[in-house]
Amino acid sequence: MTESAKRSRGPGRPRDEQNTERRRRELIAAAYHVFTTKGYAAASAADIAAEVGVGYGTFYRYFDSKRAILDHVVDYGIDRLLSEIAGDVFEPALLEHEFTVEELIETWSGAVERMCHIAESDPGLMQAMLFELPGIDEELNTRILGLGGILAATVGRFLSRAVDSGLLRDDVNTEDVGWILLALTIPPVMRALQGGGETERRRYVDTAMAVLTPGLRNMAAPD
């Protein structure tokens, strides 16, 4: 290869790749905004392109369809939910910690608070994840349910340590308890979407804790 050919190819390729990746990220972020404000069903590829300020055809150079970009938008939303809701709760060091029942319930109530904060600050995301996206197609349903399964199984493993240490009763399935805790986060989120405030949320959490704590505690365990 001649020196002139090297000069013409070498510097251009990295810039092209960087520009391509930048444009893809811009389109995904735009799709996230359009889907969570306008709704997936009502949105179009043209809406997404307009949000970025590019022509209609540019969208199709990066994604085959509106449905194709939706998978990336779901990943974008799930990453936000997991980072803000879970935080460092499931860090390996904390998983080794022997939690009391009270600490377990407080950890759950903290996750509820963070979910409600997202519902208040970004209601479109919660509305999409809870109501709109699960009905689009079977593939997306499987992904969303699979995420719930992963979280429930993680909580179940977390609870198993408390069962082994005698803090929790041993006649309950810990993964089922994980699903129950996930399900119990939905009502306060829906109330937050309807404008419910902190006082109402605190009452709900206190009621749930009053029911859950004696139901999970191993009554034979020493105080």
Image: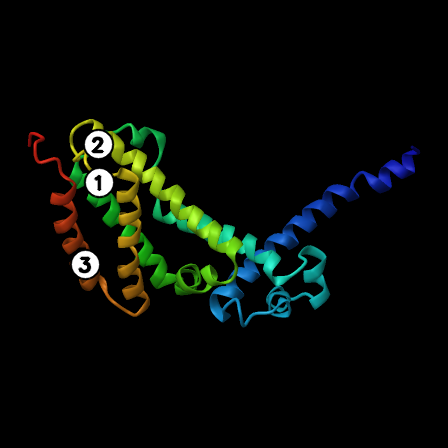
- Viewer-side residue, 110 vs 185: 185
Residue 85 bears which disc, if any?
none
Q: Residue furthest right?
A: 2
Name which quarter of the figure residue 90 lies in: top left
Name which quarter of the figure residue 63 lies in: bottom right
In the displayed structure image, the side of residue 54 where residue 204 appears, left or right: left
Calculate the distance from the C-alpha at mark 3 to the C-alpha at mark 1: 17 Å
Q: Amino acid at mark 2?
A: Ala
Calculate the distance from the C-alpha at mark 2 to the C-alpha at mark 1: 9 Å
Whether pointer 2 and pointer 1 mark residues with C-beta atoms closer than 8 Å, the reply is: yes
Residue 204 bears which disc, if any?
3
Residue 216 in sight: yes
Q: Which mark is first along the chain, 1 or 3?
A: 1
Residue 104 bears which disc, if any?
1
**Residue 180, above or below 42:** above
Residue 27 in sight: no
Whether pointer 3 and pointer 1 mark residues with C-beta atoms closer than 8 Å, the reply is: no
Q: Amino acid at mark 3?
A: Tyr
Q: Quadrant of the N terminus?
A: top right
- Viewer-side residue, 41 vs 2: 41
Residue 129 rendering spot, x and y as whole percentages: 43, 59
Residue at 65%, 54% (x, y): give it: 23
Residue 132 rendering spot, x and y as whole percentages: 45, 64
Helix, strand or loop at mark 2: helix
Q: Residues within 10 Å of mark 1 (few under 14, many from 20)?
A: some
In the displayed structure image, the side of residue 30 where residue 176 appears, left or right: left
Helix, strand or loop at mark 3: helix
- Viewer-side residue, 33 vs 208: 208
Q: Quadrant of the C terminus?
A: top left
